[in-house]
Amino acid sequence: MEPAYIYDAIRTPRGKAKPDGGLHDLSPFELLAPLYTAICERTGLDAHLVGEVVLGCVTQYGEQAGNIAKTSALYAGFPSQVSGLTITRFCSSGLDAINVAALKINAGQEQVALAGGIEMMSRIPMMSDQAAIFADPKVALSARILLMGSGADLIASLQGASRAMVDEVALLSQQRASHATNAGFFKSIIAIDNPTKKCVVRTDECIRPQTTMESLAQLPPSFAEIGRAGADAVQLAHYDHLTAISHVHTAANSPAMADAAAMVLIGTESLARDIGSRPRAVIRGMVNACDEPLQVLSGCVVATEKLLRSQGLSVDDIDLFEIHEAFAATILKLQADLGIPTEKLNVNGGVIAMGHPLGATGAIMMGVLLDELERRQQTLGVVATSGAAGSGTAILIERID
């Protein structure tokens, strides 16, 4: 089997998913195009070498519909023979794009692939495609699929997590993200020009550095009303040892919605000779996993556990973990179940602080992890994401000196 190597991982900043956000005025095609250009310039890649583009996109609707992986490559001026595939595994889509591209390299089907993701949530709102699993109660209840916030509050209830505990997760995410941004740790960011607003966006816009435990405590729970409308009853019927659902998640300890795109160059070892650039890491393992769908977001936990088990590794063997902050309680469950120490986990903050552009998040996290492994001169890292319905994806990488 041919190993899959990561030659580069780049991303746009994460813009606020609002009309006044720095990226809002750009179409998904306009946001992706600078990444195609930058990854070729940074690595010496000839676009004619690329066999496949795989992009994650959750809401494939409107401007994001029509196989944006293929069409964005054409828009960016890539050769017509480059194939394109757009995938979704909910919020794991960007990481699964890397997974699919790496498998194509492993199988010898491709020598070079670009993988990543796109989500412009200010232009294509979450669930604007009216998927039946979220819009049709009959379908949703039959499949035991609830909205993400309801799953987060169930996880908190099962963990016995208090409001203060989940707020502490959010505060640490904000503090770490603010420090990493100010220190210039995010080397994977490509500045994006917005001619409409006459600005250049260089950093993540969602970070709130002035956050305190006192300011977090002032916010009301976001998902209590959904619970009263029937979600609580469904969950309590399945987990009959619970007497109530604790509605502890708010807008501030939940992932911030964002606009962003990301791209990762993956290839064989021989690609280094063709482009004159050394690979930055090799992919050592990849898994998908699923947990109980009523918990919605716990997939990153079971995927991380499955990955470590499949590789014969323990938490102690891994230098850094970049795990999806799919609401604060998920991080508490991760640490309780797997014992990952805080000093190894999301050391530069996570999506609660920096934003969660659905289909792009997993690929962004890969770049964040790789940047930090290089900065610390460490070796092994795990990226894991959660999608809806209990799905999860995890990838193990080894940095190359």
Image (tube, rainbow, N blue to C red):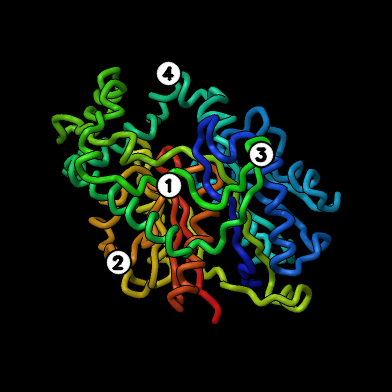
- Residue at the spot x=21%, y=44% of the render? 213
Q: SS of the residue at dot 3? A: helix
Give the position of the C terminus as an image quadrant: bottom right
Circle 1 residue: 386
Circle 3 residue: 28
Q: Amino acid at mark 2?
A: Glu
Circle 4 residue: 138
Q: Are marks 4 and 1 in contact (CB under 8 Å)?
A: no
Q: Amino acid at mark 4?
A: Lys
Q: Residues within 10 Å of mark 2 (few under 14, many from 20)?
A: few
Q: Residues within 10 Å of mark 1 (few under 14, many from 20)?
A: many
In terms of depth relative to the viewer, which is nearer, 92 or 132? Answer: 92
Q: Amino acid at mark 1?
A: Ser
In terms of depth relative to the viewer, which is nearer, 53 or 102? Answer: 53
Nearer the observer, disc 4 or disc 2? 2
Circle 2 residue: 343
Residue 281 locus on image (x, y percent): 56, 72
Quick one: which residue is furthest to the right in this view? Answer: 80
Nearer the observer, disc 1 or disc 2? 2
